[in-house]
Amino acid sequence: MNSVDAEQPEEGVASSNAQFRSGFAALVGRPNVGKSTLLNALIGQKLSIVTPRPQTTRHRIIGVCNLPQAQIAFVDTPGLHRGEKRALNRAMNRAASSALDDADLCVFVVEALRFGNEDDFVLQRIAKSGRPALAVVNKVDGVHPKPKLLPYLADLAKRHDFVEVVPVSALKTYNLEPLKQAIARQLPLGPAMFPPEDVTDRGEIFRIAETIREKLTMELNQEVPYGIAVEVERVANEVDEDGQIAVDATVWVDREGQKPIVIGPKGERLKRVGRIARLELNRALGKRIHLTLWVKVRENWADNARQLKQLGLE
Ligand code: GDP
Ligand code: MG
């Protein structure tokens, strides 16, 4: 025994590591409460795309936050929602549900002064999971005057045995440090799961596809409801003669009639989307890309399990 002890690292290090906490905190809530905005604000980087439309997030995305005494692996999820008719919606709900069941802590996100059936649906699912839950009341920047929040917070606290209820604004990055501390306190003791330089489980190709989808969704507004997916077909290994990296991506629509809407008159809409996406990606990836977008039809892809799999949506 003594000889083993002698091989341990310095005592100071060993004892501080013994206090280290690490685990998964799943961000769950109905669509549009600001889960993805919150993930990005907590990590300080845009990992997950955000639009004013519900059901923007389709995948599970991990963002790692390193604190001196803890490592929190945040899991952004598609909003849990009813209406599981389409294969895509079922896949999104599955992704959110499994993140919840695998989490060390469930972070239930709601919107200040709002609590409806959709929120209740998610809360029931959390209760069923048996995971400890912390409630985050987001978008408090929109509440004036602030005391209006108090009865809402009290009411929320009565709905479930939350470990804490924390008001924040993801958009204005208000109260996020206390939120991190509150979450860290709930994680199990244990060493970090990810090396400190790994901020996310998602790579560059995912980032490119999602950025294009975000810009397209913003541009299309309500015109093509949920019917688009983006697939990066090729990223060149080397820069071209202009110092750019060629990227080819396909925008999949699920009906022939959507093609001209996405392309726009004289191709202008698609060009604009390509330009805005390229500018953001150049900044985010720290390299210059040359983006070529194609629009193709895959009939009813969102209803087809095999096609969802091909698009990485299981
Ligand atoms: P998600 O579906 O839960 O991931 O929600 P998103 O992060 O995509 O955000 C949905 C909408 O809410 C977007 O228009 C965001 O800009 C907006 N939003 C998110 N957080 C806040 C916030 O703290 N305050 C305000 N005013 N808007 C927010
Ligand atoms: Mg989202």
Image: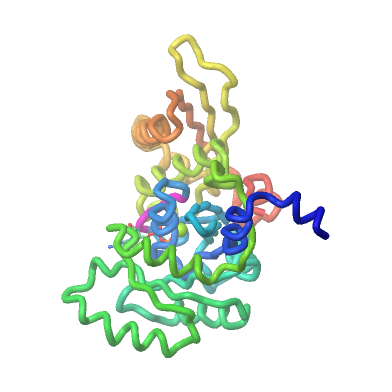
Q: Identify the image quadrant of the N terminus.
A: bottom right
Left or right relative to 260: residue 104: right
Structure colour scheme: rainbow
In front: 62, or 294?
62
Where residue 149 sits: x, y (%)?
Answer: 26, 80
Q: Say which quadrant the C terminus sits in.
A: bottom right
In the image, is residue 51 part of the stretch drawn in magenta? yes
Prevailing secondary structure class for the magenta stretch in the rendered image:
loop
Expressed as whole percent of the image width and height from the top left, the position of residue 209 reads 51, 40
Q: Residue at x 40, y 29 (%)?
A: 282
Segment tinted magenta in the rendering? 48-52
Percent position of residue 207, x then y: 50, 40
Asked whether 209 or 170 is in front, the reply is 170
Q: Is residue 113 magenta?
A: no
Residue depicted at x 50% and y 37%:
208
Q: Position of residue 154 (x, y in %)?
A: 34, 87
